[in-house]
Image (cartoon, grey):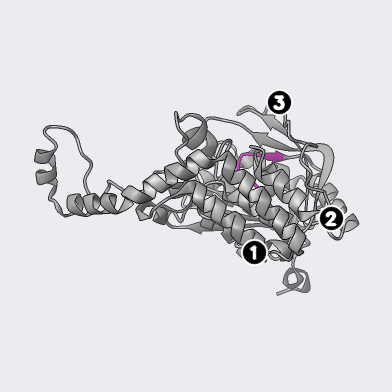
Amino acid sequence: MSEAISSGPRISVGLPVRNGENYIQATIESILAQTFEDFELIISDNASTDKTAQICQDLARRDTRIVYVRSLENVGGAPNFNRTVTLARGEFFKWAAHDDTLAPTFLERCLEALETNPQAVLAHPWTQIIDAQSHWVKDYHYDGQLATASPKPSVRFGALIHPPHQCYQLFGLMRKSMLQQTPLHGSYGHADGVLLARLSLMGPFVEIPEHLFFARSHPEQTLYRFIWTQKRPDYRALTVWCDPRNAQRLITPKWTILREYWQAIAQANLSRGERRACDWETLRWARTYWKGLLRDLGLAAIYPFQKIIRAHWGTLKPEVASKSSKGTTRSSPGNKHSAPEPSGQDYPAAEQAI
C-alpha cells in the first residue's frame, strides 16, 4: 500500500443510500467537482434494488476517490448511515444524502472555517431548498437564526432542541475525532437532532453565510412518507425504517428523545452551572411535548397485551386466521410485522414537529 493511501485523505465524505437512482448521480458529481480535492467518497449501498449499484460502480471506475460498499440485505437507515463513519480514514468527516447537492467550494470553505476556529466541532454553510428538478424553491429560514456559535454549551444545546429545524447542520463538515466520541446516529426518529445536540455540548458550530448546500425536497423522501403526509406523524414506521429490528420492540418516540437528551448532558464535560442550565432546557422541551410523552406512556401500558395478541395470532394457521376474520383479508403471520420497504431519501431526516 502506498504512503498516500496509508496516510489517508484529509476529508472523508460518507454517502449512505438505498434505492437512490433518481438523484444519486447528480449528488456524486457535485461532490467530485469540489475545489478541495483531497477527499474520499464512501458510498454505502443498503441493498438497493434499483439502478443505484450500477450508477455508483460506473462512477467509481472513473474516479479512484470513490469507495463503494454494498449490503446484501436491508440493514436499516441508521446502521447504513454509521457504516460510512466506520470506514472513514480522513481527519474530517461529512455525511451526504443521496439526493442533495453541493456548491464546488463547500468542502474548501468548511475546512477553512474549522482550521480558523480550532474549538469548533462542526462547520456548515447556509442552505437553499431545491425541488426534484433542481429548481430553487426557497432559502432555508433558520440560517443565521440559531445560536450554535455561542460560547455557552447550554445556549447551543437549547438552540438546537427547541425549534423544529431540519438539522441540515448534520451535513456540514465535522472533526471525525469528536464525532467518534458520540454514539453516532441512533436507530430512532429525530436521532439526527439528538446527535447535533450532543455535538453542541462538545463545542461551537461555525456557520458560513454562503449558500453552498442544496437540500432537495421531493415526495419520495423520508419526511414526506412518514411525517408530512400523515394525519399524525408515523414515528413507529420511521423508527423501523431506521432499523428493521425495531419492528418487534416497544417504540416510545418522545421518551426515547428525552432519555437521549438526559444521557447527552450526563456524559458531557460541563460545569455544574452549565449542566443545570442544560437540564432546564430539557425540562422546557418536555413541557412543550408533554402530550407526546403521555401518548407514549399509553403505548407502553398496552404493549404487553399487544405481545400476547401477536403471539396468539402467530400460532394460528393461515386458514384458521382467515376464518376468524369473518371474510376480511388478513396478512400472513410471517409478513404481518415485517419492516416497510423504504425508497427515496436515505437518511433519517429531522422531525418537523416532535
The crowd level at tag 2 (other Cα within 10 Å; few <14, some 14-19, many 20+) is many
Front-lying residue, 9 or 222? 222
Front-lying residue, 307 or 171? 307
Look at the image and tell me whether residue 261 can be seen: yes
Task: Identify the image quadrant of the C terminus.
Answer: top right
Q: Earlier in the sequence, mark 1 or mark 2?
A: 2
Q: Which residue is mark 1?
A: 266
Q: Main SS of the magenta segment?
A: loop
Look at the image and tell me whether residue 11 can be seen: no
Q: State the extent of the magenta-drawn residues as a range.
A: 94-101
Which residue lies at the image location 39% right of the left edge and 53% below the top edge? 250
Which residue lies at the image location 60% right of the left edge and 29% below the top edge? 132
The crowd level at tag 1 (other Cα within 10 Å; few <14, some 14-19, many 20+) is few
Which residue lies at the image location 27% right of the left edge and 46% below the top edge? 336
Q: Where residue 7 sits in the image (x, y, percent)? A: 76, 71
Residue at disc 2, secondary structure = helix
Rounded to the nearest angstrom, the CA distance separating label 1 from label 2 is: 27 Å
Q: Which residue is mark 2?
A: 114
In the rendered structure, does residue 96 fall within the stretch colored magenta? yes
Q: For the residues carrying marks 3 and 1, which lies nearer the camera in this image?
A: 1
Q: Establish if 100 lies above or below 245.
A: above
Q: Name the amino acid, label 3.
A: Trp
Q: For the residues carrying marks 1 and 2, which lies nearer the camera in this image?
A: 1
Q: Which residue is mark 3?
A: 136
205 on left or right of 347: right
Q: Where residue 49 sits in the image (x, y, percent)? A: 44, 46
Q: Where residue 156 sits in the image (x, y, percent)? A: 75, 49
